[in-house]
Image (cartoon, rainbow, N blue to C red):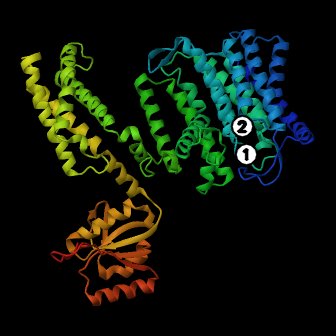
Amino acid sequence: MNISHLALPALLAAALAYLLTPYVCTLAQKLGAIDMPGPRKMHTKPIPRFGGAAVVPAILLTLATLAASRVDFHPDLSDRLYLALAAGLAPIFVVSLWDDIHPLGPFTKLAAQFGGAWLAVSGGLHLNETVHLFGIGVPLGQFAIPLSMLWIVGLTNAFNLVDGLDGLSAGLGLISAASLGIVAIVTVNPATAVLSLVVAGALVGFIPYNLHPARLFLGDSGATAVGYLVGCLTLYGGSKLSSSLAVVVPLFFVGVPVADTVISIIRRAVRGIQGGSRLAIFSADREHIHHRLLRLGFDHRRAVLMLCGAGVALAGAGLVSLFLTANNAAWLLASLFAAGVVGVGRLGYDEFAILRGGSLLRVYEAPVIRSGHFKLFVDVALCMVAFYGAVALKYDDWNLAAHRKLLMNGLAVLPAISLVVFWLFGVYRRAWRFAGVGDVLGVNGAVTVSSIVGFLVTRLFLDADASPTLFVTFTTLLVLLTSAGRASFRVLAHFRDVGRAEGRRVAIYGAGTRGTLLLREIRDNARLGFLPIGFIDDDPSNRGRRIFGLPVIGGLVDTSRLIAAHGVEALVIASDSLAPVEMTEVLKVCGCAGIDVYQFDMRLQLMSPPAHPVEAAV
């Protein structure tokens, strides 16, 4: 390909967008396409939001000039595909222009976007029926068309959602389009190269007016148009790739907008489930990635630079992946995904704090979960999984090529035997919510007995050569699975309790039985409003230890220092071993520090007429 043939259209698009933008600013003010400040807005003065009226005409005029010049820059792109691209853009662009002037509802805009996607896909801009992933051909068949439409609509909205800071959506669009152009040049795909670089050029001409502080916003008309064009180009360009990551490479180039969209959908869905709102997914908010960066202390420019830098890094990874083996590309993708998970975790979304927030614990409150029938089904499933695992591990036959009959024989009797034995052992009368050591031991005993009975039944009636080690492995796996299931509520409750970050910071004096009882009560009863931060205990053997996840931070003589060092706001005394002199000193120290002192005192007291008067302290 001649590089000058690719550079000239891009430069023409940039010049046209740069020249058109001032006139579009004036037109936006006359038409009332003005973005006013508001609670969800980052700007403090009215700014025109009609940028699409400069970017899209610059792209179309450039392509029209190429067509009129009759210079064949695009030998492998038929006129039909050009028409499909333009036909699909038309309803999206027109509706978005109207939305910039008179805001429309989300369903109207979605209808236009799906209509545009259908036109583009009908014209040939869609996935192949077989796509390549890590060297493996994945057949899509008839799903190629709907998946392509969802991809186009998704990217159309992704660039619109991320358009929350000056220069962000335009900058990410420029990175995506330029990256697609580079890949098209490397893979000798002139059609995608020309179109991608024209889109990139138009954004280059527009960005000077859109950088902070912006004089013109991209608006829905510009953000949705850029998203649509990038979505179509990734489909067409990806279909021309022969690498093992052909279906994934285009995703690298739009990684930041896609990540923000996926995160927004998931967290809004979680919030809707928790709040009982079915339409929460359509509720706008100020919780996008760029909003979170601003809350973390980044200024406007640094937040945009950081996200654009992430876009460049992902695009670079996409380019590198073209030259990697399938295995190395998979490791690269896994590393980037792990880095993304860690990065999102640092943003502090409460909706994703399923352990700290206790979201999973609410599942245990569902009537279907609390019913005994649910536990029966769970145990049947665990038994089947455990026996399959035992057969696969014992004979190293994960596909069951030679031991399918053995598995079927076991599954015919073992679940029924396990349920009967569990019932006889009273397993289903035990509550998962309050499972303790005795409950786990009881379940383990029932598992052991059921395995022995299952082994004997199998040897006597099904297979005289059944291996004892197979059933030992089965017993071990089933013990692990059932114990994990019974202990799951307590484990999740522990993570919720230790991860709680709200409440008055309280230290507990006394790390004995009474202190640990108090700790459990504080953690289980959020209405107390306490956040335990550590034990104070005078036993030297407890120094530096952690008791139920809480550290022993010092002794009584260190009280004054510990209050200051750990920000203690209250002290609860959970011990009766303090002498009056020591109690007086503690009250004096806490009084000087301005913190409250509580006494935790439990007594077993007889309330009926006393046959044998007893009042014992616990």
**Residue 561: image x %, image y %?**
38, 79
**Quadrant occupied by the N terminus:** top right
Q: Please tell me whether residue 564 is drawn above or below residue 283 in the rendered image.
A: below
Classify 10 Å Cα crowding around label 2: few (below 14), some (14-19), many (20 and above): many
Q: Nearer the viewer, residue 324 or 113?
A: 113
- Quote the CA–CA distance across marks 2 and 1: 9 Å
Which quadrant of the structure image shows residue 154? top right
* Secondary structure state at the residue bearing disc 1: loop
Q: Give the residue type at disc 1.
A: Asp
Q: Residue furthest front?
A: 609
Which quadrant of the structure image shows residue 477? top left
Decide if residue 200 is in sight here: no
Mark sitting on residue 521: none
* Secondary structure state at the residue bearing disc 2: helix
Residue identified by numbered label 1 = 166
**Residue 210: image x %, image y %?**
77, 43
- Left or right: 347, with 77 as reference point: left
Q: How many marks?
A: 2
Mark sitting on residue 170: 2
**Quadrant occupied by the C terminus:** bottom left
